Amino acid sequence: MVKLSIQAGAWEAPGPLYLKLKDEILRQIRLGGLRPGDRLPPTRQLAGDLGLNRGTVSAAYEELTSEGVLTSHVGRGTFVAPDLSLAGVDASVSGNGYRWADHFAGAEPPPPPWFPTAPAGADVIAFHRGVPDQALFPADAFRAALDATLREEGEHILGYAPAEGHPPFVDFLLDYLRVHRSLAVTRDEVLVVNGSQQAMDLLARTFLRPGDTVAVEDPSYFGALELFRSAGARMVAIPMDESGMRLEEAESVLARERPKFVYIMPTYQNPTGRCLSTDRREGFIRLAARYEVPVIEDDFDAELAYDREPPPPLKSLPGSQGVIYIGTPSKTLFPGLRIGWIVADPAVTARVGRIKQIADLSGSQLLQAAFTRFAKTGAYDEHKDRVRKTYRRRRDAVLAALQDAMPRGVSWTRPGGGMSLLVTLPDGMDSEAILAETAAEGVLFSPGSWFHVNDGARSLRLCFGSVTEADADRGARILARTVARHLDAGRKNRPPSRVSRLPAV
Ligand SMILES: Cc1ncc(COP(=O)(O)O)c(C=O)c1O
């Protein structure tokens, strides 16, 4: 059943409440928050949640049912009509002035995911921020690199870059990939882009048509799921275990679904932090080659390794011609650079490069040049050493607090690197309900439903990159206390089990 939240101010316009609720439900259908086939909350529950009279909710549901927007089944509940035409819904929403909706092409993008905020003035423990800690950004050293770049390169550095990237940056990148990522590649195999998210967008435009299928690890990176879905693709899930994507399941998905590509984060996966084992890397490359399916390898945080060196990227292994590798300095340095790179067969980089050029002409020469200069002074390597130590301590603090305080029945991943881990709650628990309570104490995290293809109600992601050790400890304990409270309440409300007196066998 979907949650229905009401936009602030929705009640303030004049007119009967039930019509405003009706308009609000239509608005959410139009925005994609409610989809055909979704079940609405029962009238009593919604009335309670919104502080309305139950008759008001019934009147709104009845009117929408008589218009064919909702369907109602005795005993099963009220649903958005499964065969609803969204064009009809658009026309029935009252607009203010100019009707932009009549001019926009295609379906409305889904709204950003729902998120509670901490109370004003609360000390926020930001486990929800999947980003490096801003307090660690080397602003002074980068400013010096920028100043020197402008001073020494002159005006030409302020012009457009060649489509494939600023040439001295590409030289630096080839060297960097060889030394740090075991990738010995040539210039025509590299394309510089504006962040790895843009790489994925360009690859979606290159490979996907509406209705295509993309295979992903389950759970996967929310931004990739959103992007591929917005290109009209359907996601199919490949389950994981502690060693990463499971190859038997991957094989049956490839055989059954024939996806256009597989999107995978082999090293310190987002959200689990898991790392695909060496054996599986080799097995997966063989599998992808056998099914002739391209693989998009998102290598976004492999250099944030805390315990040991992770296995080398898929792209460095024999037989990896079908792998399209994406890299970024967003997690190891800072995301505001908006620099990323694709490493792939020249046929791919040429085609994607042309699509990029048509889309945005060029990246920033200035930033590519400044990044090159910054890295060549040794400042990038020093920065990575520093943040690795800090993030390792933060990871250890969260893991220790979870170990100490989480009730039995709760499990979590133990990442060897990266910035996130996934907690799985016992059956029947809902991480969004837990979040609503921890948020009131300032502890924010991302609910698992964002990352899972099918159902992620029981899981939640904790990012420890932007959380000090003391906060990591305090936040994990507040989370554990909240989970324990829910478990206790669940036990008290559960009817006595009939099977509990059967002899054990
Ligand atoms: C797994 C993963 N890939 C890609 C990105 C996007 O990074 P960029 O800043 O390079 O676009 C993110 C950002 O959070 C991410 O978590």
Image (cartoon, rainbow, N blue to C red):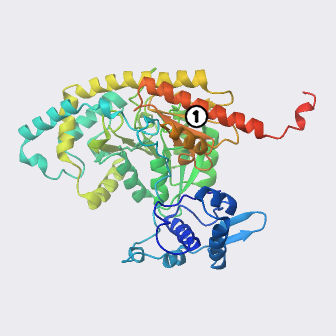
| Ligand 1 located in image quadrant | top left
Residue 226 versus residue 214: which sits nearer the camera? 226
Q: Position of residue 493 (x, y in %)?
A: 77, 40
Task: Tell me if residue 285 can be seen.
Answer: no
Residue sitting nearer the eye, 409 or 421: 409
Whether 277 is drawn above or below 321: the answer is: above
Q: Residue at (58%, 34%) from the top-left corner?
A: 423
Of residues 21 and 148, the one nearer the viewer is 21
Q: How crowded is mark 1: few (under 14 residues within 10 Å), some or many (20 or more)?
A: many
User: Image quarter for residue 37?
Assistant: bottom right
Asked which quadrant contains residue 134, the reply is top left
Q: Picture coordinates of residue 434 (x, y %)?
A: 59, 40
Which quadrant of the structure image shows residue 320?
top left
Q: What residue type is labelled 1?
A: Val
Res 6 visible: yes
Comparing 390 with 283, the one in front is: 390
Q: Residue at x 57, y 25 (%)?
A: 402
Q: Residue at x 20, y 29 (%)?
A: 376
| Residue at position x 27%, y 23% in the image | 382
Q: Where is 208 relative to 289, above or below? A: below
Residue 30 sits above or below residue 6 on the image: below
Provide the residue designation for mark 1.
423
Q: Is mark 1 on a helix, strand or loop?
A: strand
The image quadrant where one finds the C terminus is: top right
| 337 lies left or right of 62 | left
- Residue 462 vertical position relative to residue 263 in the rendered view, above or below: above
Q: The N terminus appears in which quarter of the rendering?
A: bottom right
Query: Percent x, y for residue 470?
Result: 44, 23
